Image (cartoon, grey):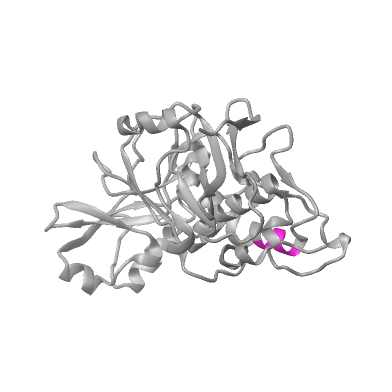
Amino acid sequence: MKCFYCLQDKPPNKYKKREHVIPQCLGRFSPDNLILYNCVCDECNQFFGDKLEIFLGRDSYESIERKKHGIEPKKPLKNKRRVKSKIIDGEWKGAIVEEAKADKPGEIGISYPIQAGFYNKFMNEYIYYEPKDIPSAEQLEKEGYDLKTAKMFADESELPQLIEILKNKGINISTKNDLIQPNPPVGSVLVESEVIIDRTIARALSKIAFNYLAYVAGSKIVLRDEFNGIRQFIRFDEGDLKKYFSVNVSPILHDNQKIQKFNTQITQGHLINVEWHKDAIVSKVSPFNSYTYAVLLCSNYNGIWYPIKSGHYFDLTTREVSKQILV
């Protein structure tokens, strides 16, 4: 039995785990969530879970949508570096926030990581830093910061640690005189998020596309040499990202494409398709039907041509999977 990712021949007892086309971090669906059996080895399956999908589910634009749709991770990621969010209006403008579970479906809650904010006289506003990013007192003063007061988000157990970090930076904060301990804003706040789509996230999304091709056309076809480029990119992080992966392409469904200019959508769920483009095989992946990504699976197929044109919809309301008609 040959794994179509590592291309190693392995005995049947190395294929105990199931490989899902849509990773379970994006939801569980019926009847079977589109599952691949006996063609992705357990070692590759484990690698994808530990090195790619954990970040797709907890440190990506899709992780924000995941919270919005009530799909909660078992535990948050400690060091998020791909999603940075902050309040952009009101009294606590600039405060750093992280997405959290909301009380109502369709909404996104926020939490406040440990941080310190200093007033910048040039910009006339507070700028907030997480502990690892706090500059030295000398650098802050040079850039126009007032270090006599600070706004801090920290609970009682975190506060001494934060104050100690500030002291090591040359910033002396007195808990009695200088410290302003803010109460987080209540109600809705306007938040801006900066999201980085790096190679890890691109590979995780490309894996969905490659798995889908294997599901639609069979695992034997993806063992062909023409797919070595995308295979090496996904499994071993080799090759040019821009060759295989494109961001924010046109929506999969025609109706969604027509109303895209109104910044809305009519389909609530994941969409995926795969089809020929001359000699190339291309897939589109749209988690939560938000951003749509294109994945070039093969640029020049040399085998016997046969029809490959398929699409599936993963409904986040009913949690059912249905086949879509492509036009």
Write the residue at 43% across / 52% down. 113
Which of the 4 image quarters holds residue 323? Answer: top right
Can you say whether 272 is above or below 14 in the image?
above
Magenta span: chief secondary structure: helix
Residue 44 falls inside the magenta stretch: yes
Q: Nearer the viewer, residue 157 or 308?
A: 308
Q: Nearer the viewer, residue 188 or 138?
A: 188
**Region rendered in magenta:** 43-47
Q: Position of residue 13 (x, y in %)?
A: 88, 60
- Taking the spot 49% from the left edge, 55% from the top edge, the residue there is 157
Residue 187 seen by the camera: no
Residue nearest the observer in this picture, 181 or 124: 124
Q: Residue furthest left?
A: 122
Question: Which sits in the foreground, 76 or 248?
Answer: 248
Examine the rendered structure and indicate whether residue 307 appears above or below residue 299.
above
At x 36%, y 40%, the residue is 184
Q: Is residue 276 left or right of residue 254?
A: right
Answer above or below: position of 14 versus 104: below
Q: Which percent across, then down, holds residue 273? A: 56, 42
Q: Is residue 186 left or right of residue 54?
A: left
- Total numbered circles: 0
Residue 21 coordinates in the image, percent (x, y): 65, 47
Q: Is residue 194 visible?
A: yes
Q: Position of residue 267 (x, y in %)?
A: 49, 28
To which quarter of the image does residue 109 belong? top left
**In this picture, residue 32 sits left or right of residue 147:** right
Quadrant that contains the N terminus: bottom right
Magenta stretch encompasses residue 11: no
